[in-house]
Image (cartoon, rainbow, N blue to C red):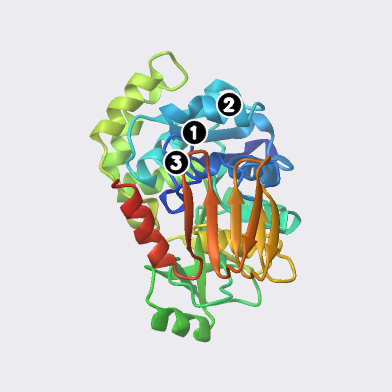
Amino acid sequence: MTLDKHNYYCIIMAGGIGSRFWPLSREEKPKQFVDALGIGRTFIQLTYDRFSGFIPSENFLVLTGEVYKDLVLEQLPQLSPQQILTEPCRRNTAPCIAYAMYKLRQINPEAVAVVTPSDHYISNTDRFAVVMQEGLAFAASHPALLTVGITPTFPATGYGYIQTKQDSESVITPVLRFKEKPDLATASQYLAEGDYFWNSGMFIWSAQTIIGAFERYLPEVASLFASIDRKYGTCDEQEAVNQAFNLSPSISIDYGIMEKAAQVYVRCVADLGWSDVGSWGALYSLLEKDAAANAVSGADSQFSHAGQNLIKETNPNKKVIIDGLSGYMIADTEDVLMICPLNDENHIKEVIQQANKI
């Protein structure tokens, strides 16, 4: 395969609903379409920005639900409607990736793609660009499935892990095994051993290689999207895709392919400043803080005898005054005010679940 950067593509997965970020993230406008950091850019816009320096705008595809298509085009006006691939129903990551890769193979049989979530955050974007281009070059010249591992900085129980043996001769190494989200004791053991890395959910591969893996490990999914090959790029595409999704099993790409395939590699990296921003606590860790460790997004705030609070305000004209409160998250939207202890993620999750039953 020729190492031509015009063959490089980015596939952004933007179909989730970000339920852990309620009330900021709602089904009608999920987390990826929200400016959670208060910087004037949503997560999906930041994702596009990270790749736009080395992937041309015409080489992006966005996977999302039909209801979000207009929202994607509004937030990413650089893209055409043909670059937005819509799923009629949620079937986890394997079917939507199959759709994108079979369509991409028809567009360019030499395509090499990064598949990325739409709602993660990377602070070191220059380093990220270098790592991604290294990965694309590797995938273009090797029949391999590549994932990205993040060097853990604490014993996280909310991430899956990737085990590998680091090699001084290469920054890309074979995956030994994937591990499900561990308990705290196991996560601490992983951290101590040093050869386990957080699974970032980013993948890099050529269209030829991943389609070969679908044919071998998920033949039922492969046959559905291969059978409509002549429909891609035509007015009949969406109807055919809808039928394929309705018949497809719901299965993740990790379980369906990555945990079974032989030629699976990982690029481990420590200095990306990566976060999946998967909780209110994760958002707090990303925001700048005052001398009392208060973090604010989207509000003019005043604190007195208060510390270690997170304030997320969606009304920029509202002033927030906090006196005598410490260690809380306060999320204020048009119709919901939510106040919870910040350091108990399980409790916040329970509160959200109960609130959504009301």
| Image disc number at residue 105 | 1
Apparent side of residue 32 relative to residue 96 in the rendered image (left or right) = right
Foreground mark, 1 or 3, reads 3
Nearest the viewer among 187 and 230 is 187
* Picture coordinates of residue 164, whole percent (x, y): 50, 73
Nearest the viewer among 283 and 213 is 283
Apparent side of residue 6 relative to residue 87 in the rendered image (left or right) = right
**Label located before the other in sequence (2 or 3):** 3
Identified by mark 2, the residue type is Leu
Foreground mark, 2 or 3, reads 3
Identified by mark 1, the residue type is Arg
In the picture of the structure, the residue carrying the numbered disc 2 is 73
- Residue 203 can be seen in this image: no
| Quadrant assignment, res 257 | bottom left
- Label 3 Cα neighbours within 10 Å, binned few <14 / some 14-19 / many ≥20: some
Secondary structure of the residue carrying numbered label 3: loop
| Label 1 to label 3: alpha-carbon separation | 34 Å
**Which residue sits at x=62%, y=40%?**
315
- Label 2 Cα neighbours within 10 Å, binned few <14 / some 14-19 / many ≥20: some
